[in-house]
Image (tube, rainbow, N blue to C red):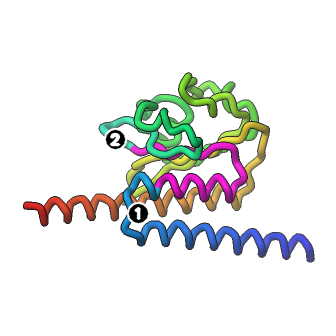
Amino acid sequence: MRELEARLERAEQQLGLFQRVSRLMARDMDLDDVLHEIVGLVRDFLNCDSCLIYLVEDGELVLYATSDPNRQSIGKVRLRLNEGLTGWVAREKRLLAISREAYNDPRFKFFKDLPQDTFEAFLSVPIISQNKVVGVINVQNREQKVHSGGDMEMLSTVGEQVGCLLVLSRLKSAATSTVAL
């Protein structure tokens, strides 16, 4: 009975997370602000040490949001779609979960500007919009962690919501440009 109650409580928490992300999407907020809110929500929900959002820009993955209070690496960390674990997730359009020693994976690429590169556990999902990868969400833990199927599904769903958010943001930009003409 307790296990069932715990699962129900986690499902209610997950629904609450999806509702908060949806409400962020409906607000008239700057894209960068919304992405920073989302990384905070994901970090809190998964109780992880780091959450990062990369977006595809000119054929590269660019760090757009981080749960790290020091945001100096935003816009500076860039990688090609064939680089690192993040590039692999984008290129393959597949989720990747590593429970320990993510830095020893042969696909791993070290970035001196990211302290997360020394973390043990890694969970990453592509951000998909209209069947194209438009970014990647990474979640990392300092200690070993086995991610549950529910956590993987939750992060994938947030990735889909962020993909929709990017479409809305582009539509807003296009509408603003048209009105300005």
Residue positioned 27% across, 64% down in the render: 172
Q: Position of residue 37 (x, y in %)?
A: 52, 57
Quadrant (top left/top right/bottom left/bottom right) for the N terminus: bottom right
Quadrant (top left/top right/bottom left/bottom right) for the C terminus: bottom left
Return the residue nearer the eye: 26 or 122: 26
Q: Mark 1 packing: few (<14 Cα in 10 Å), some, or many (20+)?
A: some
Q: Is residue 98 visible?
A: no
- For marks 2 and 1, the one nearer the N-term is 2
The span picked out in magenta is: 35-55
Q: Which residue is mark 1?
A: 164
Q: Position of residue 135 (x, y in %)?
A: 44, 47
Q: Position of residue 78 (x, y in %)?
A: 42, 31
Q: Is residue 51 above or below residue 4?
A: above
Q: Amino acid at mark 1?
A: Cys
Residue positioned 61% across, 67% down in the render: 17
Q: Which residue is mark 2?
A: 57
Return the residue nearer the eye: 156 or 46: 46
